[in-house]
Image (spheres, rainbow, N blue to C red):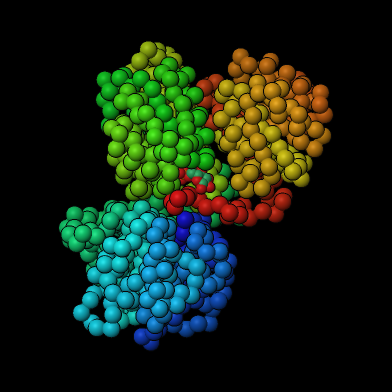
């Protein structure tokens, strides 16, 4: 997945584009570039590496161009280097293009171009489009840039969000979307294009989300949109106001976004709970879920679908639904669900979970469900995102912008919102008002309890520093502790590159115990439930084989049993996984910091994967 930015207006375009790319760098950060029109010619600047490297390269380049396009890359076609960095141009240097997505018939298109004598300069799929558009434009003036782009896209298979710049039409940009997110920002005599509002929210909060199969032509003062089949649908486009403001994207006092977002969790949880707890009926109110009480009662099963941390949050959600609503529930990686030709059950409520709302496997799982008549709601953080719009109704997570690649506050808000969903489903069934109120109060206490854990950051950091040098680490949990163990291992892997595995405690003696040794620390998760004794014996099993143990618990355990102990406040038992998860974020963060990792931009990863 990549980040693309476009600008046409009254400002010097290059600084606006570079600032936008900086905001989108979490989408991909292995190379970057931009193109402006300078004295009627394209001026393209590209670099392997970060947007900062591009900024340095541009320093001193005076180009008062008021139109331009830019790109920060997560390589799919062609290795990450300066040549393969975007923008790509045609041989004559008339047309420049930036693209997010994958052109599936690129090989065929590239071959056709080479057969027609075109010399390709890069290994990318995108370059082919630049040559094709230039060919459609020809030498005459009778073909508009918009038509040239549309004709080209009629021969393209695959996913794209793209912006095209033409030196002979230096007052307009043509934008197209099919599968990859594109948003237009409407300004005073200026227009912005970006993969995400993060790149333009400092200039305007009036935006238009392009739909799949749409093309837009923008100038400084106007825009119009049409479908690839040529229908002008500009009249149907109503701008929406972005609810995030630019400050939310600032680092403030923090050195990186992950630590900032870990510390934003109490306020993020409060925002998720605001207006959604109903004391009168001891239940939850989820205005975005368009299901009445009878429809909620008719749900026989709940299935959460997501990728990465969203999948693990779904596991926490399934546990909450089974415990509070007493209906069968589970979670499945969306990438598995969409490809296994699932049997879609009409009485099952499917929940598509995604922070970005753009993860391709989850989006395709939703489309598969809708094609088969499944009832699906979204649980997404980014308003206006593809999954949110595809589902049409659901739960907004209200975690605020999450920039760090490793998800923290969005995951906590996923689990918090799933507790609300479980409470709602429970209270339209046999869950008593007293039990409902217990959960309502328990949820209300969570933000402050998270705060208490954050206040113990230094102690957790000390433990992280002690074990950061380990090459491998186990995370072990049972029942409520199991999804916490999985997410804990995910976090450590994602940002510290320590090989971490999660295991159900009961499975340990059936294999993994063989790996226990002095240099293999284990985190054992011990919620306050009726399995404490079993979990303590798991610690003894590991200790008996010389394995160091970090105990993570909300209950009292014998002094000295574990090599290190991390305590969290006691919450309502069903809600404890939400708290137990927080110290593992902090542990991973400080282990990665100790190892000098780039915390916000871990290698080989991206904030959400919008391409296959
Ligand atoms: C990965 C991210 O690309 O996508 C993970 O690195 C994230 O942090 C996963 O959990 C799913 O993303 P989303 O946006 O669908 O929740």
Total numbered badges shown on the rendered structure: 0
Residues 488 and 256: in front is 488
Against 6, is 549 above or below?
above
Q: Which residue lies furthest to the bottom in this view?
A: 39
Residues 338 and 388: in front is 338
Residue 114 visible in this rendered orientation of the protein:
yes
Residue name at image x 17 percent, y 59 percent: 231
Residues 291 and 44: in front is 44
Give the quadrant of residue 559.
Answer: top right
Residue name at image x 52 percent, y 77 percent: 58
Against 501, is 7 above or below?
below
Give the quadrant of residue 371.
Answer: top left
Give the quadrant of residue 576.
Answer: top right
Against 47, is 42 above or below?
below
Residue 353 placed where, x, y %? 43, 38
Residue 261 placed where, x, y %? 54, 46
Q: In this view, does 275 lie to the left or right of 79?
A: left
Residue name at image x 54 percent, y 50 percent: 405
Q: Is residue 489 left or right of residue 198?
A: right
Residue 253 placed where, x, y %? 58, 54
Against 358, is 339 above or below?
above
Residue 281 visible in this rendered orientation of the protein:
no
Residue name at image x 76 percent, y 29 percent: 514
Residue 275 placed where, x, y %? 36, 33
């Amino acid at each position: 997945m990549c980040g693309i930015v476009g600008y046409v207006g009254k400002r010097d375009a290059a600084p606006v584009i570079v600032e936008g790319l900086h905001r989108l760098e979490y989408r991909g950060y292995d190379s970057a570039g931009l193109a402006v029109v300078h004295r009627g010619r394209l001026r393209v600047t590209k670099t392997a590496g970060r947007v900062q490297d591009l900024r340095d390269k541009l320093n001193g380049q005076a180009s008062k161009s008021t139109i331009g396009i830019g790109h920060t890359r997560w390589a799919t076609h062609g290795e990450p280097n300066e040549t393969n960095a975007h923008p790509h141009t045609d041989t004559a240097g008339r047309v420049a293009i930036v693209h997010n997505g994958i052109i599936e018939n690129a090989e065929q298109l590239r071959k056709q171009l080479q057969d027609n004598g075109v010399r390709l300069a890069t290994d990318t799929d995108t370059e082919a489009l630049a040559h094709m558009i230039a060919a459609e434009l020809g030498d005459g003036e009778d073909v508009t840039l918009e038509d040239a782009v549309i004709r080209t896209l009629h021969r393209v298979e695959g996913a794209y969000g793209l912006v095209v710049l033409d030196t002979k039409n230096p007052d307009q940009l043509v934008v197209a979307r099919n599968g990859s997110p594109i948003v237009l920002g409407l300004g005073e005599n200026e227009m912005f294009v970006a993969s995400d509002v993060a790149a333009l929210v400092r200039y305007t909060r009036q935006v238009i989300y392009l739909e799949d199969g749409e093309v837009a032509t923008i100038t400084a003062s106007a825009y119009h949109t049409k479908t690839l089949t040529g229908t002008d649908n500009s009249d149907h486009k109503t701008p929406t106001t972005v609810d995030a403001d630019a400050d939310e994207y600032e680092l403030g006092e923090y050195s990186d976004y992950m630590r900032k977002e870990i510390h934003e969790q109490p306020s993020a949880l409060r925002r998720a709970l605001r207006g959604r707890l109903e004391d009168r009926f001891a239940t939850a109110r989820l205005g975005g879920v368009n299901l009445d009480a009878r429809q909620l009662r008719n749900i026989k099963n709940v299935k959460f679908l997501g990728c990465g941390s969203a999948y693990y949050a779904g596991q926490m959600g399934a546990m909450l639904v089974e415990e509070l609503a007493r209906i069968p529930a589970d979670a499945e990686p969306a990438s598995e669900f969409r490809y296994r030709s699932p049997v879609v059950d009409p009485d099952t409520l499917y929940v598509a979970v995604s922070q970005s709302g753009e993860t391709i496997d989850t989006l395709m799982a939703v489309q598969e469900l809708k094609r088969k008549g499944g009832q699906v709601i979204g649980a997404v953080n980014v308003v206006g995102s593809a999954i949110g719009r595809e589902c049409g109704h659901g739960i907004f997570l209200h975690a605020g912008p999450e920039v760090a690649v490793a998800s923290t506050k969005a995951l906590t808000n996923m689990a918090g919102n799933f507790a609300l969903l479980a409470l709602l489903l429970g209270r339209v069934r046999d869950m008593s008002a007293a039990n409902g109120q217990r959960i309502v109060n328990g949820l209300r206490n969570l933000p402050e309890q998270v705060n208490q854990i954050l206040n113990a950051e230094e102690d957790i950091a000390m433990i992280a520093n002690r074990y950061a040098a380990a090459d491998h680490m186990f995370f072990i949990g049972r029942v409520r502790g199991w999804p916490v163990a999985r997410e804990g291992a995910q976090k450590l892997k994602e940002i510290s590159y320590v090989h971490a595995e999660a295991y159900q405690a009961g499975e340990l003696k059936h294999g993994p115990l063989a790996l226990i040794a002095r240099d293999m620390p284990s985190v054992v998760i011990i919620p306050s439930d009726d399995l404490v004794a079993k979990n303590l014996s798991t610690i003894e099993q590991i200790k008996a084989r010389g394995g160091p143990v970090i105990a993570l618990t909300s209950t009292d355990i014998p002094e000295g049993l574990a090599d290190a102990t991390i305590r969290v406040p006691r919450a309502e038992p069903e809600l404890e996984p939400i708290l137990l998860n927080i110290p593992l974020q902090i542990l991973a963060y400080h282990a990665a910091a100790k190892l000098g990792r780039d915390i916000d931009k871990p290698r080989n990863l991206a904030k959400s994967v919008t391409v296959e």
